[in-house]
Amino acid sequence: MRHIHKESHLVERIGWLRAAVLGANDGIISTASLILGVAAAAAAKNDILLAGIAGLVAGAMSMAAGEYVSVSSQSDTEQADLAREKSELLDDPEFEKEELAQIYVERGVNAELARQVAGQLMAKDALGAHARDELGISETTSARPVQAALTSAATFSVGAAAPLALVLIAPSTLLIPIVSMGSLVFLALLGLLGARTGGAALFKPIVRVTFWGALAMALTAGIGAIVGTVV
């Protein structure tokens, strides 16, 4: 007798993984860039630290608000589609059954079998069947605004804390190179962690995240140096 076991798929992590990687990545890049920009303007270490802390708080709140608003908009759209589909199922269930069957036919199922499958699925959960196969909405991919907001804020704070910790331990004369190199290492580790968690290849995510982080930090440090010279 064959035993049926529950499989765990990596796609189930996509919701929180996207928000987590985005939050931590932004936390490291934006805070490190802010620190380097202020440091390049020849500011005192206490001023640099204060700017970094302010960037952490503001960034975490911005990430939480932005994720909540954007994912809530996605959730609103999903709910509107589900309400419309529910109404259509009440008005003309036979048409909706044929519509679902045609989806299976287009995927390669025999027409007669497709109608049987559509009928059985609709008998159990008509709205769920149409949400999944017609609208592409499922429990795995559905929008979760609160989860996305909290995940983004928390991971942004963790990411931002990394370059701030480097400011605390680095001597003033070596602050810029230590924060720069340390932040790139943090970004590379983040790319590695994100790739491993999502089951992706390792090289491309690491290169991608470190390249854009290095570019952001270099540009911000350059602007800070120019402003500091002028002022």
Image (tube, rainbow, N blue to C red):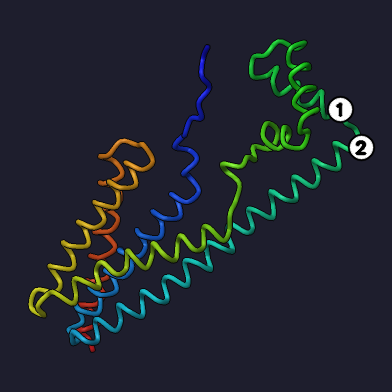
- Residue linked to disc 2: 91
Furthest-right residue in this view: 91
Location of the C terminus by quadrant is: bottom left
Asked if labels 1 and 2 touch by Cβ distance under 8 angstroms, the answer is no
Q: Which residue lies at the image location 20% right of the left edge and 77% below the top edge?
A: 225
- Residue linked to disc 1: 95
Q: Is residue 129 left or right of residue 222?
A: right
* Total count of labels: 2
Q: Which residue lies at the image location 74% right of the left edge and 12% below the top edge?
A: 113
Question: Tag 1's secondary structure?
Answer: helix
Q: Nearer the viewer, residue 122 or 106?
A: 122
Q: Which residue lies at the image location 36% right of the left edge and 74% below the top edge?
A: 56
| Residue 194 position in % (x across, y down) | 34, 47
Tag 2: residue type?
Asp
| Residue 45 position in % (x across, y down) | 18, 84
Residue 187, quarter of the rendered image: bottom left
Furthest-front residue in this view: 1
Residue 86, quarter of the rendered image: top right
| Residue 17 position in % (x across, y down) | 43, 49
